[in-house]
Image (cartoon, rainbow, N blue to C red):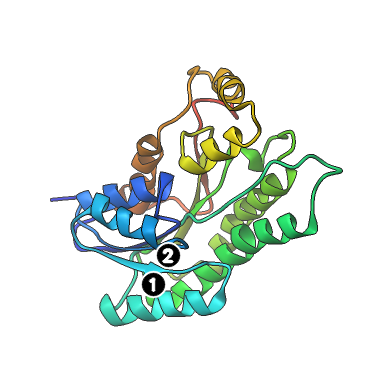
Amino acid sequence: MGRLEGKIAVVTGANSGIGLASARRFTAEGAQVVITGRRRPELDAAVELIGGDVLAVQGDISNLDDLDRLFETVRFAKGRIDVLLANAGLGSLEPLGGISEQSFDKTFGVNVKGTLFTVQKALPLMGPGGSIILTGSTTDATGTAAFSVYSASKAAIRNFARSWAVDLKGTGIRVNVLSPGPTETPGLMNALAGTGMGEAMVAGLAAQTALGRMGDPDEVAAVALFLASDDSSFMTGGEVYVDGGQAQI
């Protein structure tokens, strides 16, 4: 019997990277999974990779109408949510002095506004024993060159979990943050490649970890499974780092 047998899980940003790896692992552990992402071709490819009982709904979490459509689909098709992995997020490398208003609005619109309303609109479908997992980052607690807007958005995610754990007191719903370090996701690798110094920057990120390497999305997904399952039933308001020691040393 899988660790998520009989559970309904919703994963945002599941078309690639950590979201996709987590959706695959949740499905393998018995969950019925609903995934969402902005790009239909990648979302369709994710459905094929995940296999099993998976439902895909295209949408952008910064668009509240898309979120309403997502959760109305979940309500109609599944009736409830046991696990919510609010994973969708983005960021760009821009140093202070070169940050544009458009980039700021896009990053906070998805990472902060989108995460907030993803959780808020999912709550009516959740009950005791439910697990909310917010994808954070080691950048929520460390300074990172040219990444201050993204880092600030992830610091907001960290406080969301602390504050919402208090708001949810008495409901039996728990909320925790999963904070990856440098992980070989398409989003990060494409961002680094766009700098023209991709290989050097990857090597630099790997060197910052105690393990001396980048992480794999499946390694992060393994911890997402722990937070989704009843194995973490006495955890709320917390943060779990999956960072190879990067933010710990």
Front residue of 239/193: it is 193
Q: CA distance from mark 2 to mark 1?
A: 8 Å
Considering the image in quadrants, where does the C terminus appear? top right
Q: Is residue 110 left or right of residue 74?
A: right
Q: Position of residue 45 (x, y in %)?
A: 31, 54
Residue, disc 2: 173
Helix, strand or loop at label 2? It is loop
Q: Position of residue 121 (x, y in %)?
A: 49, 75
Check disc 1 and give the amino acid type: Met
Residue at coordinates 74% horizontally, 37% vertically from top-left? 146
Q: Nearest to the eye among marks 2 and 1: give it.
A: 1
Q: Residue furthest right?
A: 97
Q: Quadrant of residue 111?
A: bottom right
Q: Earlier in the sequence, mark 2 or mark 1?
A: 1
Q: Is residue 116 left or right of residue 242?
A: right
Q: Position of residue 77 (x, y in %)?
A: 27, 78
Residue at coordinates 52% horizontally, 35% vertically from top-left? 189
Residue, disc 1: 126
| Viewer can see residue 166 | yes
Helix, strand or loop at label 1? It is loop
Q: Quadrant of residue 8?
A: bottom left
